Amino acid sequence: MKISWRVKIFAKIMMSRIPFGYALWQRLGLFRHGQMDNSDYAIKIFRSHLQNAGITNPKGMTLLEIGPGDSIATAIIAASYGARPLLVDAGAFVRTDMLPYTNLVSALSEDGLVPPDISKCSSIHEILIQCNAQYLTDGLKSLRQLENESIDLIFSQAVLEHISYHEFPDTMLECYRLLKRNCLCSHQIDLRDHLSNGLNNLRFSRALWESSLFSSAGFYTNRIRCDDMLEQFTQAGFQILNCTMQRWDSLPINRKELNSEFQSKSDDELCISVFDVLLCKPAVTNDVLAGAGRSS
């Protein structure tokens, strides 16, 4: 039976008020941050971003994943390629049992790679040490701890849409600051609502949508549409090298039901459901912009 978006909103708000930790909801399959605890999926996503960036051999590079979600899989995969991994998220969401990581090591070995030996590891911390990796869990504040122009590639998979609307511009400035000159960002952004894969999230006023009632209930997205997000990338200093879009054939919502904030958007813009973008930090950069995201 198909559950309506209204019921999902009500149920998720109610569940978010129950004082259970994320790990329990994760085990129950009610709240999840992606599928990166699936070995095949994690390897596929990692390789897709390397391919998007035209990187055939990341050995010696420092790679930053924004929003690793339920797994530190990227740390193990990147280390298997001889790269140094950094993972930044808005909270400590990763699975702490060893099963997904031992499965991942087996899959990488079968694929001809030499993953780090985690056979004696009994914790996430020990795995990270073996991978020469960092896992930071304070979102924008964590990005601000990292060194200027220290990253060779930044990537994310269906994550940027979850960054707080108010923190998004500063997050992009931080990514710009961190990236080495002439290096790249590869992002896939999912603009569908996280209720029924439509546009039901555009029904609400900004005041309600950004309230703690909604923003902490597990279905939040920042609702920044494609054109506006591309503009924010440009304002942060990035050059847009490529952007590919997936679209609905027609609007998945009656236009009259959109909040007034989105009424001025064209059907063409609103029909973009997912897009992939490749960004570059130019070799000659604006030094004022490069430091604009820093806070004292």
Image (cartoon, rainbow, N blue to C red):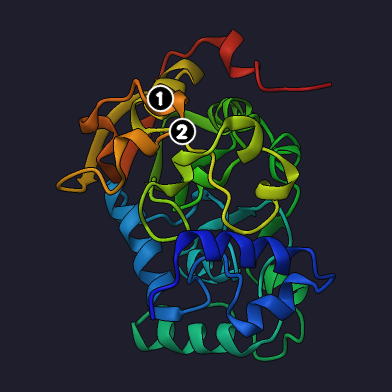
Task: Report whether 196 appears left or right of 19.
Answer: left
Residue nearest the viewer, comparing 106 with 213: 213
The answer to whether 149 is drawn above or below residue 86 in the figure is: above
Q: Secondary structure at mark 2?
A: loop
Rendering coords of residue 145 (x, y %): 76, 38
Rendering coords of residue 55 (x, y %): 32, 50
Residue at 66% in and 48% down: 214
Residue at 51% in and 10% down: 286
The answer to which quarter of the image holds residue 30 is: bottom right
Name the kind of residue labelled 2 in the image.
Ile
Name the kind of residue labelled 1 in the image.
Asp
Q: Can residue 201 be seen in this snapshot?
A: yes
Cα distance between the residues tagged 2 and 1: 6 Å
Residue nearest the viewer, comparing 135 with 8: 8
Rendering coords of residue 125 (x, y %): 77, 71
Find disc 1 in the rendering and name its residue: 228
Q: Secondary structure at mark 1?
A: helix
Residue at 62% in and 62% down: 10
Rendering coords of residue 35 (x, y %): 48, 71
Task: Check contact, mark 2 vs mark 1: CB within 8 A.
Answer: yes
Outermost residue on the left side: it is 249
Residue nearest the viewer, comparing 178 with 275: 275
Task: Assign the C terminus to one quadrant of the image.
Answer: top right
| Number of other residues with Cα within 10 Å of mark 2, as a class: few under 14, some 14 to 19, many 20 or more | some
Residue nearest the viewer, comparing 67 with 214: 214
Q: Which numbered dot is residue 224?
A: 2
The answer to which quarter of the image holds residue 234 is: top left
Task: Assign the N terminus to one quadrant of the image.
Answer: bottom left
